[in-house]
Every structure is written in C-alpha cells, then in structure tokens.
Image: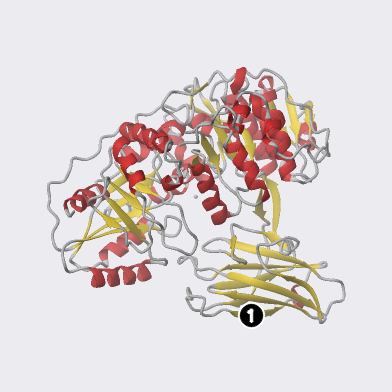
Amino acid sequence: MTVEQPCPSPLTRRATLAGGVGATALALGGAPAIAAGPAPAGGHHGGPHGPSAPAVHWERGHLFPTFDRPQGAVRVADMRDLDGFDRLLLVSLQGLVNRVRPEIYLIADDVDATWLPDLGVRTRWEKDPLSLLERFRRRVEGAVVYDMDAPDTINLATTIAARRSLVVATAEQARTHHLRIVEDLRGRFDDEPSAIYAWAVENLWEKSTHRLLVGLPPTQTVEVEGTQWTELLREKDRVTDSSNLDTYTVELADRVGEGEVFVKLSDAFTDDGWGPTVRHATLTIDGEQTADFTPGGDEETPYLFDGGGSATGDGTRFADGGASFIYRFEVPDGASAVSLALRMENEYVVSATSTAPTRIEPFASFRDLAIATNALVTWLPPSGESGSRFEELLEAVEPGTVYAGWFSNDVDGEWSGVELCSRHGVIVVAADYYMNASVLSGIPAPTRARPSKPSRRRPENRTYLTLTFGEGDNIQFCERHLRELWDDPARGSVPMNWTITPLLEDVGPALLHHFQRTASENDLLVCGPSGAGYTYGDSWPKDQLEVFTKASGRYQERTGLDVVYAYSTPEPGKPSPTLPDRVLESYAQHVDLRGIIQTDEKGSISDPGAAVPLIGTFYPAGGVETYLEALTEKIETEGGDGPLFIAGLINAWNWTPADVKTLVESLPGDVEVLLADEFFDLFARSA
C-alpha cells in the first residue's frame, strides 16, 4: 500500500518517554496479562539507540539509516522452500549479522533472485539455507522463544532479539540447532495484543531506537496446497452499483468435513474493484439458527477464519481484486440440512471446502532491519481501543520519524493509520514485505538524476493525457511488483509514468539506480505519495508541515523526481478533498516541482495556477475496455473548448504495460499522450 510529528511541550507524553522515564508515563494500561512477563532485556544497548551496530549509520537529511558496504562475498540463501518458522529464524539471524557487516542476502521469492545480477556484489550461494546458523554462530548469544498461542509475542521476541543478540525461534528450532534458550516467552502472556505491547513499551522502548517505528503483523496466513474448493454461487454480470443486493442462500450439507465447513467469498471480476460486499450472514442447521452476525463486529469474530486482505466498513465486509475472506462454521455430526444465507451485493463468488484451507505461520519480512536498528516492533490497530495506545507511541517520537511496515485491517487501517500518523507528524512507509533491507541499504549506487529540460511548446485545443502507475510510495512494491512490471517487453512502447519512492536512495540505492539506468525515453519516474514518504499533508499540524516538505525537497534535489503524486485525507463515501493552499505553498517553498497529481478518481481537480500546478487523477475502475469507455466519455463531455488535461491513474496491481499500450493505441486521434514532465509544462501554461 509513505515525515513528521508535533513538537512537544516539556510536559507532553513524548517528552517524558523520550527522556527515558519509560512507558509508565503513557498510561498504557498497567501490567501485562501475566504480571511477571519476561525479564527486561539487558545486554549492551549502546546508549539511547540500542545495541552496538557498527554497520548502521543515521545520516543527517535522511529518514532511513544506511549500512556499510559489503566486504567480500555476500552469502545468498534460498528460502523459497522454507516455511514461515524457518524464515523468521533466518531473517532474525540476518539482522544480527548485517548490523555488524552486511553479509547475508535471503531469497524469499523469485524477484529476490532476479535482482541479484543487478546489485554489483560478489555472491556465494549456500546449499542449505539453515547452514547459516552454524556459519554465524559466534554472532548469536542464543534464542528468544515466542508463543504461538499468543502470536504477538513474535513482535516482542523481535525487539528482544535485537537487544540481546538472539535469534527468534521456536523451542523445537532451538533444540534442533543447539541454540541456548535465553528468553522464553511461552506461557507468560495471554493472547491479548494490547497488554503485550503495553509491556513492550514499558520495558523495551527506552533503549530502542527513537528514529524508527516498525509495525508488522506477527503472523500470516498461508494457503494449504491441494485444497479443493467447490463453487456454489457466482455473479455473472459486472455489477458495481449494488443493484443486485439480496439475500442468497447456499446449501452446505454436502460440503461438511469433520465437524466443520469453510466458506470463501472472492471477487468474480478481479480487474474492476467491486468484489463481494456482505452485509449479514445467518447459518441454519436442521432448522435451528446457529450463527447470525453482521460483519465487522465482535459477533463475526468466532466465524471469521481468514480475513484475506478484506476490509470492513459500515457493517459490511468486502474483498476486491485478489482479496477474499473465509468463514468457518462448526457442524455437529449427523446434521442433514446446513444452509448459509448471505445478504450481499456486487461481484461475488461463493465457494466451500471441508478442510482447513489455510494455516498460520510467523511473518518474517522486514525484521532484519528492525533488529539491525533496534526498533520497537508492534502491531497496534490505529483505531478502536488500541488506537489510543498507538497514538501515544506516535507522541513519543519527534516530527519526521518514520513508521515503517503497515497497518491491520487493510483499507480502513491504511486510511486511519496514515491520518493518525500525519496528525502526529510521522511519515508512513509501506515496508512489511520489503526483503533484505539490511544488505540493500549497504550496496552503493549512483542515484542522482537531473529533471528534463522544460518544454517550449504551447498547449493547443486538444486533449493531453498522462498515464501513471500508482503504488510507488511502497518500497516493497518498488522491490517486488514494480520490477515485474518493469521487465514487461511492452514497457517503453508508449509514454508511461512510474511512481517510485525517493527513499530507495537510503534503503535500496541499487534498485533506484536500476530503474533510472534502464528507463526508456517513454518512461518517467515520478515521486510516489506524497514525497519523502506516504502522508496526508492536509492532516499535518500547520507548524510542522515544513518538516515533511523540507525532507521531500532534499530527496527531490538528490534524485531528480520533480513530479509528485500526493494524497489528501480520504473521507469515506466522499470525493477526495483538494489539497489546501497551505499544503501547496509548503511544497512550492521547499520542493522544486513541476506539478502535483493528487487522488481524485473523477479527474475534477484542475488548478494550473496553484502554487504548484495541481491536477486530480482520473481513475475509472476496470480493465482496458471500461477505462477507454469512461475516458472517451470524459473527453466528449469536457473537451472542445481549449486544451483538456487528464491525469489518468493506472492500477498497478491489475494492469500491465501491455494493457497501457492497448489503451493508448485505442485512443481517438486528437488525444496526445505525454510523460508527466511535459504534461505539466503545458498544463502550467494553460493557466
């Protein structure tokens, strides 16, 4: 799915926490679920920013640290065949090793292997990835064991691991690899995340880095191979207006396994963003109602087996694109009639299976950077009861601090989380799936670039269109899916803008250099939301906004990204508000920009005479055909009286460069497709 925070008075909670008093000043809710908890982590903490990490350098004017350059060959280990437990073990080892000197590169999936030849470092492959434990045994003091019955202890263990030079392991792994168990979290906490993180803040925050906050899910859902789903119901038409809202009933008796049945809801048309929306569910067994709930509340919780990237809002649960969600229902032996009534709408597919289709494993990615920097790792939802605790943690850091990772509850978590961080001057960087940060940050590469020269053309009475792939604020997108799109042979065939984060200068300079070096004359890198990280500028305190725009200006000057794609604070069910003058003026003062493309969807925002020329995105849902239809309608409705400027946004998850090529080749002849730099040169002259 990304730099700042309010200046505290001497008596604020931030001032108290930063001063080392500890989280007792936060009133985070007292003792943990098991009052004893683990002993406070000791060992060398290297002052206020944690243990000694000679390879990690926090440089002035940068939001992330950089690491030393690798010396000698980097050890490459392929984890693609390992489960989440072994991956977590190795990623924690990677963080410990690389904070002293970057030496380990891990392959989690194919794209990690794709990058290797472009990194410019010598490599040595390990035949057995787990042999790294023996090779680097002297760097490890032992293991911290987490409790899968209280899975948030995985995040607690990650923070403790950094403090005490431990790998994060299960008890079985510790025995197998002859690791001394230094800290054992089993049985010390109930499965109450809020209490676990309250203990973490009270006991671990003081000696954690205050330059970086990390938010990671403790676990992830993994599909079980060989699961056989039976499709029971499908919407065959494209329905995006809820016109098919009704109660639909599916019979499940033949799908029951050993006392349980699993029901999945997924998107019938994954390219248009209008998957199933469920408003109510009722299960009836042999005439007796055994489950009756509205999504999003506590009554749904016993039945929600896997949220699968779905989101909730206004008493509904919905899943678009590749997302889905699964309910699990218990069914007694001998039941003859089992029916599920779903009040739902839009483009649904309902399927069922008799066996558990997924399993839970630890989430491993990005923990190497958390351990190497000695960051506190949490997973506190930004709304609800835990929202205040998350907010108090934000208040404990200075304006311009980065919150890296992500938020729970998908879209709702994103909007509320980014808004909350923005109100406290904290920059968000989507990073939870970013791999190898602790080695990529240490591989140097030139990333300075100069913007193109201004166009001398004057706008004519025609339509000018620029097309931009979104998601580039997301460093894991830049590392993973962007590379896949970039390697599409159709890239470069027509003008395309690619959002990318300038923070790659810190966390992946070789990646940024690759995109800069291999860009064609039809490719333009533009800055992803909303500059030096993902934020909502209109939610920033007025007296702190310049912290973010100044940081954005520094990165812009070094990377040459002179067009920004920016967000305003979303208002559910309403059009995106236009970025206010104070935000545009701050950008104008501190960032050398040609223009800003901001979220809009309808393309109704257009102000070439603003402090920074501003235009809203035109973003019709769907594939090429529906996009072209909506675009043609907009041109026919709004064009003809002077130049018409349209900033089209492309769904980076569902579209490819080949799709964009098809779209451009299907446009009317009087539409000129431009890269965003020339587009804004002409747009500004139309004022």
* Residue named by callout 1: 247
Report the residue at 68% width, 19% height from top: 138
Q: Residue 320 placed where, x, y %? A: 53, 64
Determine which quarter of the picture holds residue 520.
top left
Given the current orientation, which residue lies at the most extreme right position? 334
**Relative to 277, residue 617 above or below:** above
Instruction: Say which element carries label 1.
Output: strand
Q: What is the basis of the colouring in this image?
A: secondary structure
Report the residue at 28% width, 69% height from top: 634
Report the residue at 46% width, 33% height from top: 507
Q: Nearer the viewer, residue 218 or 568?
A: 568
Q: Is residue 134 visible?
A: no
Q: Residue 295 placed where, x, y %? A: 66, 66
**Relative to 176, residue 50 above or below:** above
Q: Residues within 10 Å of mark 1 (few under 14, many from 20)?
A: some
Q: Residue 247 placed where, x, y %? A: 64, 80
